[in-house]
Amino acid sequence: MQSAALFASALFFSIGPLCAAGTLQLRVVEGEGTVYPVGARATRGLTVLVTGEDGNPVEGAAVSFRLPEDGPGGTFTSGLRTEVVTTKSDGRAAVWGMQWNKVPGPFDIRVTAVKDEARAGIVSHQYLTDALAAKSDKGFSAPHRFRSKWVLIGVVAGGAAAGLALGHSGHSSLPVPVGPVAPAIGSPTLIIGPHP
């Protein structure tokens, strides 16, 4: 019974000043639900807005961004899984340049804002996938389902270019058809009995 009373008073002590000092509002304004290729670096990142109860931006709030310890995720440019950014006069804090690991799947970035005794927290949902087209050292790499289309387009374009070149060279020994060419089918042959 005494431990329950101590817990209740400790809880009141930790929450009491927060209520007296007001509350913060925290929301993601850019980067929520982004899907990144595994192993890539985030060029956009995540931006949050910290406002007070009155809706005005809060300057000087410490905003902590935390990536998961394991599974899909990565590290910030510092090489750590936690980054702290202070809001400017517009109440915004942003992180970008995260190096994603190679584990596909959904993950959350936990965001906490603190100013004096007030605090707020949210979770931003992100996703890593190995199915996206990603840039590599060799250039653009199309996803598997698009590769056959690119090959077909390349073959058709190459054939059209070759035909155009032969038609304009004047040295071609091949006749160039002028109109549409219908496929020709020879007379059908029907064999009854053993084939010689």
Image: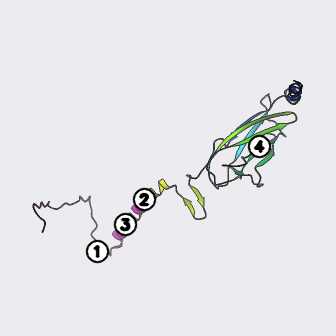
Q: Count residues near mark 4 (Cα–Cα under 10 Å), then give few for <14, some for 14-19, many for 20+.
A: many
Q: Is residue 30 above or below residue 18?
A: below
Mark 4: which amino acid?
Answer: Ala
Q: Where is residue 83 in the image (x, y as percent from the top left)?
A: 78, 48
CA gap, disc 2 and disc 4: 45 Å
Mark 1: which amino acid?
Answer: Ser
Residue ID at (58%, 65%): 138
Q: Magenta residues?
A: 152-175
Q: Position of residue 45 (x, y in %)?
A: 69, 48
Residue ID at (49%, 55%): 144
Which labelled disc corresponds to residue 173?
1
Q: What element does badge 3 sit on?
A: helix
CA gap, disc 3 and disc 1: 14 Å
Do callouts 2 and 4 mark residues in contact (Cβ within 8 Å)?
no
**Mark 4 highlights which residue?**
93
**Mark 3 highlights which residue?**
164
Q: In this view, does 3 lie above or below 63?
A: above
Q: What element does badge 4 sit on?
A: strand
User: Residue 10 in magenta?
Assistant: no
Q: Is residue 65 above or below residue 99?
A: above
Is residue 9 found left or right of 39 in the rendered image? right
CA gap, disc 4 and disc 3: 57 Å
CA gap, disc 1 and disc 2: 27 Å
Q: Where is residue 108 in the image (x, y as percent from the top left)?
A: 68, 42
Task: Give the mark, 3 or 1, whose residue is nearer the N terminus.
Answer: 3
